[in-house]
Amino acid sequence: MDKQLQSLADEIQAASGNIVADMHLTDVRILDVYTETVYPGSMVIKNGKIVAINPSWSVQAKQVFDGQGMLAVPGFMDAHVHIETTLLTPEALASVTVPWGTTTMFVDAMEIANVLGIKGLKALLNNTANLPFRIFMEVPSRVPTAPGLETTGGILGVEEVDQLMDDEMAVSLGELDPSKVLEIKEEYLRKILSAKRRNKICNGHAIGLDWDQLNIYATAGLSDDHESVSYEELAERLRLGIRALIREGSTERNANRLISGVLKHHLPTEDLLFCTDDKHVNDIAAEGHISYNIQRAIDLGMDPIKAIKIGTINAARHFRIDHLLGALSPGKFADIVLLKDLTHIRPEYVFKGGLLVAANGKLNREITGDYPDFLKSTVTLSPELCPSVLSVPAEGNKAKVRVINLYPDQIINFATEEWLDVVDGVITVNVGDDVLKLSVIERYGKNGQVGSAFVRGFKLKSGALASSVSHDHHNIVTVGTNDQDMYIAAGELDKCQGGFVAVDNGVVKGILPLPIGGLMSCDPANKVMQEIDALNRVVRDMGSELPSPFMSLSFVSLPTVPELGLTDKGLISVKDHRIISLVVG
């Protein structure tokens, strides 16, 4: 009898009471997501799976865990997340997400893939079996995100996507932005078909689409979207069979508005899911992970059981793994969260596969990962880089330029056209009106290109910030009041192989190294959080009022989020998907 067959036979025997179980979880109130009821009982666990609930026979188990009358709910699921933007390795991330009850993440590791291709992606996800949470892979569909409009370190073509789709971790094709579908680009249609042939879904990124465009998107087979910022957008997607992910990240604060709309209009919740997308570790530690989304829904007036279903069984059904996860029923993995009550989502105990992995807000054991050296050597700036390369030349005394304007709690932006002074043949910033210089510097040692533009929203009074996290190309992005500090900031990131840095008057005021792909720290979560807090204080002293300035900086260069993006090749009109002139007229 092979191992798989033996395991199933043992589970059936344990379900019959004929052999000793691994665990008996007693005295709990079980939340049943199928009938939306709560009932008292116990669960018998074997091989990491629930094999019996409230058996009539006397249970023999290696371990008995007294639930003390607590509420047992399924482990929470993040339906779409880029682990890299937490700034932590999966191992370090576990210490902040698992105690909040997240036992499953659907991960689109497109960030590391844009830096190092399939080799980097596999290196990042090489230790999943030892993690106290489950990872399912959303196979990155757009590496690079904007071919021809940006320089990246890695590429995932159709062949690589096919290879990854066959991995047992893969459950979907990762988010695909509209231009790839609306313009009928063959490469991306082949990637969609790669998922469909394997009966796997395709994730969407339907930002800014109108009704007619959403029709096309749905026709192509894109089955969800996490970019709704208004109730009207969410409702349109649901009407066309596109499931809506309610996102609450660090700079994408969508939960309040979307959930309020759902409740106001008495919308069914079966086709809603929760995700974080991009959330810094400090925010997770302070307010929660998917637990936060669930708590916000409850606080806004949603029935607690329905809120928990959005964060559990809805996600499992969407990704077609509800035979494995999402409910507390026989045959499914024993991923269980114990709560004191339904209205306060603060886990007391968290189990993954019947093993206690977190208790009283702390992970049971520290987990470390081993990452190869090639992941830590990804920043190579051109030797010709100098402050003057960042400047924008112009004739006359004034120049009319396009300015990127930030929304404080969103990743979308809007464009304005404004006059700036020209001094010594170079367009200058206007610190008083918060119009600062923004530059993207190619960091893979390929061409040394630099794109520069202007941005409003950072409110720096002096100095510069720089980051090697810049979606999705992850070149160096820097914003500042002067070219010299911006140049120094970029050079510091070259020295430490990536990270966040603040420079003022030529002095490095704070730095957070992120050497793994220029995206993630090698350090434990607590140390990273302390360093981010210190760095954010420095940025506030420099004048910025943004709650997550480096998260905002990392998204301002994205060439697929309206209205404008900036890459090393220049200013991008997102709607037209082309490079446009910075200077108007």
Image (spheres, grey):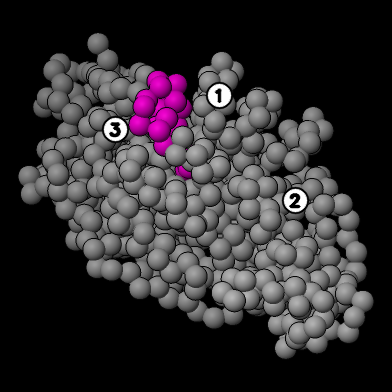
Above or below, 151 against 66 in this view is: above
Mark nearer the viewer, 3 or 1: 1
Helix, strand or loop for disc 2: helix
Tag 1–tag 2 contact (CB < 8 Å): no
Q: Which residue is drawn at 45% across and 55% down?
A: 167
Mark nearer the viewer, 1 or 2: 1
Q: Nearer the viewer, residue 95 or 10?
A: 10
Amino acid type of the residue tagged 3 in the rendering: Pro
Q: Residues within 10 Å of mark 2 (few under 14, many from 20)?
A: many
Q: How far, Cα to Cα, is label 3 from label 2?
A: 38 Å
Q: How far, Cα to Cα, is label 3 from label 1?
A: 24 Å
Please report whichever mark, 3 or 1, sits nearer to the chain's N-terminal start: 3
Q: How far, Cα to Cα, is label 1 from label 2?
A: 28 Å
Q: Is 315 a magenta residue?
A: no
Helix, strand or loop for disc 1: helix
Where residue 214 sits: x, y (%)?
56, 22
Determine which residue is flagged by label 1.
219
Q: How crowded is mark 3: few (under 14 residues within 10 Å), some or many (20 or more)?
A: few
Where residue 539 sits: x, y (%)?
39, 52
Q: Which residue is drawn at 73% across and 33% down?
A: 261
Residue 259 placement, left or right of 180? right
Determine which residue is flagged by label 3.
147
Q: Nearer the viewer, residue 26 or 321?
A: 321
Instruction: Say how many tags the image has.
Output: 3
Please report whichever mark, 3 or 2, sits nearer to the chain's N-terminal start: 3
Above or below, 4 against 557 in this view is: below
The numbered disc on residue 309 is: 2
Amino acid type of the residue tagged 1 in the rendering: Thr
Residue 56 placement, left or right of 269? right
